[in-house]
Image: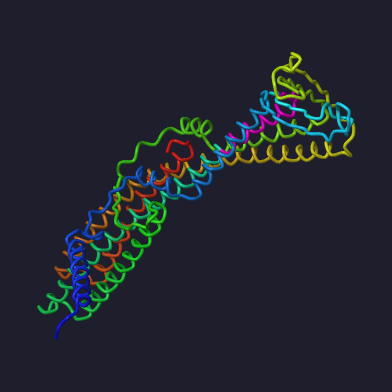
Amino acid sequence: MKLSARNVTAHAVLFLIVSASLAQLAAQEAQPGSSAQAPLTLTLQDALTRARSNSVQFQAALTDQGVAREDKVQARAALLPSLTYNNQFVYTEPNGTPSGVFVANNSLHEYLSQANIHQVLGYTSYADFRRARALEAVARARAEVAKRGLVVAVVQGYYGLIAAQRKYSNVQQAAAEAKQFLSLSQKLENGGEVAHADVIKAQIQSNDRQRDLREAQLAMDKSRLDLAVLLFPDFNLNFTLVDDVQLAPPLMSFEDFVKAAQNRNPDVRASNAGFQAARFERASAQSGYFPTLTFDYFYGIDAPHFAKREPDGTRNLGYAIAATLNIPVWNWGATHSKVVQADLKRKQAQRELSLAQRKLQADMREMYAEAEAARAELELLKSSADLASESLRLTILRYQGGEATVLEVVDAQNTLTQARNAFSDGEVRARTALANLQTLTGTM
């Protein structure tokens, strides 16, 4: 059968497309996949940096801070003279007179090209500037509060995952020990040294540890998912954490901690700046009772021809100065209402400042006591874990010698698992408590 030129061309194109697809698939298979790539290793500071760049709430706080900064720039600009250049042409219908139909106009053709320096002097602009500057401080402090809240969330997620990994390791070890004890009881049963009931009990213990292992794996996966949401915009789960629990810096004295917390705490700074902003808002409202003075300086032309000089040689360029004093007389109580409104806000801001100061005192004592207690309990928890490990070893030896029951061995195994988990939790608790102190002082 003969093929037409069109069919030959179509077959050639199809062959090229298939060849290109196969080559692309081969190249993709030759490259390592994402699952085969080495996991990303993160320290706590790495996690905090990633969370700050990916957190919508924290970025929103930074946006508010930027908006408040621009508000301050605009309020400051209102205190300074402004310069504008006005150009205008006015045409009036002629009626045989130099001014045309409209009496108020100067000429049939009037050209205005003037620079205007405008300045308003009044207490309102100054109070508004001070208020804008205080509100910028509020926004900056609130950004610090948002940053601290994000730090707390990341610290809890970071060390929560480390704690879950440690518990998983502890349960793995417990499962291996339960399996070894099951094998030991089976050997002793075969030798006629123990009853079959001991093997059943050991089997139940091994089954329980396998179930605990699955639950520990689930808890670890959940902790990893929660942390990944905070750290990665693309929901990456291929990462590992640096376990720095045992590398925690020493606990500072309570006096140094109080001094740092009082000077750097963003909650108190935000409340204090909010109180200052409310004070200047009240002052701005009170300035409505005072007069304002406006200056205008004009330089340019206001003439029937768009030129520096008239045809007869008259000079058009010139200047004019206008000063206006505005004295408020009556506005149906609007100014008084604004003053009352601002005073209510000022009193509420003062209450919030007092609450923030009291809460800081309570938080400082509570969080420092938590960190102190967590550190003090570490030695006891480590001692309990070591003693539980030795107890299990001795109990198994007594069981092999026929001096202990299977219930004693199972109890010793459970006690060891609990002691290991308690020690892991204690280490994570102490490290988290120290990180919370650092967030309270603004040092993290």
Q: Which quadrant is home to the N terminus? A: bottom left
Residue 426 rendering spot, x and y as whole percentages = 36, 50
Q: Which residue lies furthest to the left in this view?
A: 191
Q: Which quadrant is home to the C terminus? A: top left
Residue 73 rendering spot, x and y as whole percentages = 60, 31
The magenta stretch spans residue 126: yes
Residue 436 rendering spot, x and y as whole percentages = 45, 43
Looking at the image, residue 255 sits to the left or right of residue 15; the answer is right
Looking at the image, residue 239 sits to the left or right of residue 104; the answer is left
Q: Is residue 272 visible?
A: no
User: Please, is residue 41 above or below residue 74 in the view?
Assistant: below
Say which residue appears at 30% left-offset and 45% top-offset: 244
The magenta stretch spans residue 121: yes
Point out the stretch of residues depicted in magenta: 117-139
Say which residue appears at 71% left-offset and 32% top-offset: 279
Q: Closer to the camera, 430 or 298?
A: 298
User: Please, is residue 194 above or below residue 440 in the view?
Assistant: below
Q: What is the image's colouring?
A: rainbow
Say which residue appears at 49% left-offset and 46% top-offset: 58
Instruction: Tell me the quarter of the picture where residue 115 sits.
Output: top right
User: Please, is residue 77 above or below residue 318 in the view?
Assistant: below
Looking at the image, residue 310 sits to the left or right of residue 257; the answer is right
Helix, strand or loop: magenta stretch: helix
Q: Closer to the camera, 281 or 288?
A: 288
Q: Can residue 39 be seen in this view?
A: yes
Q: Closer to the camera, 192 or 417?
A: 417
